Image (cartoon, rainbow, N blue to C red):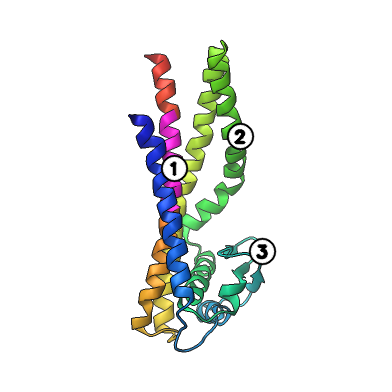
Amino acid sequence: MYWLILFIGPMIFGLYAQHKIKKAYAKNLRIGSRGRITGYEAAKAVISSAGITDVEIVQVPGQLSDHYDPIRKRLALSQANYQGSSLAAVGVAAHEAGHAIQHKVGYSMMKIRQTMVPVTQIASTVSSYVMMGGIFLIMFGGAVLGYNLLALGAVALAVIVFFQLVTLPVEFDASRRAKVQLVELGILDRDEMKGVNETLNAAALTYVAAFVAALGSLLHVLMLLQGRRD
């Protein structure tokens, strides 16, 4: 029964979150903002209002490939969001600008997240191979080494879970900053914020789903290790 909860549940939740963001984004990509301000212009206005002058705003290929790179101080927007003036484009662009503001003010959760990036990348690469190897050894007679590999996999998964947990306030705070600035700077009217809220809230759900999936995997491995002790 726990297998259904730890694997099927997060998988369904993840699929729902992906469906939600695709639907919300597609819907609000078709609704133009009254001011016809593009995503690039919105991002520029938001970071300029925060006194940020050293962040480059560039266009990148792909859909929803938008991100902020604090190392290169580069705010990347997908073509639809860079050139477009829809509620979705303006909302996503302002969200990424929110990350630039976090970087400037030294937002603590963002600092922790960035510090964890290298070790999380290693953990993500190692975890799957280690756990697959551990399960294979347990099934074919190498129980001692197999369970040791599972324990190593649990450590890697714990790193990933913590990274996903720290990511949540970073993303929520960036959206909060974006929503405030869009209204205060007059980029959008208050009644237009419904489309922005719908888009950014749906995007936030994908990060919650990623955390739940990682936590489910960690709990599953811990239960396997607990079963050995029992």
Find the magenta span and give its range: 207-220
> Does residue 122 sit above or below 55 in this rendering?
above
Question: Camera-side residue: 45 or 190?
Answer: 190
Looking at the magenta stretch, what is its main secondary structure? Answer: helix
Q: Which residue is at 37% across, 34% downward?
A: 4
Question: Which element type, helix, strand or loop, lies under badge 2?
Answer: helix
- Was residue 34 drawn as part of the magenta stretch in this picture? no
Residue highlighted by disc 3: 72
Task: Give the CA distance from mark 2 to mark 1.
Answer: 17 Å
Which quadrant, please, contains the N terminus? top left
**Residue 29 spot, x, y in % from top left:** 49, 74
Question: Which element type, helix, strand or loop, lies under badge 3?
Answer: loop
Residue highlighted by disc 2: 126
Q: Which residue is at 47% across, 57% downward?
A: 108
Task: Give the CA distance from mark 2 to mark 3.
Answer: 27 Å
Residue 122 as seen in the image, left or right of residue 23:
right
**Residue 152 spot, x, y in % from top left:** 54, 27
- Mark 2 neighbour density, 10 Å: few (under 14) some (14–19) many (20 or more): some
> Does residue 32 sit above or below 105 in this rendering?
below
Which marked residue is nearer to the observer: mark 2 or mark 3? Answer: 2
- Mark 3 neighbour density, 10 Å: few (under 14) some (14–19) many (20 or more): few
Residue highlighted by disc 1: 213
Which mark, by number, is residue 205? none
Task: Give the CA distance from mark 3 to mark 1.
Answer: 30 Å
Mark 1: which amino acid?
Answer: Ala
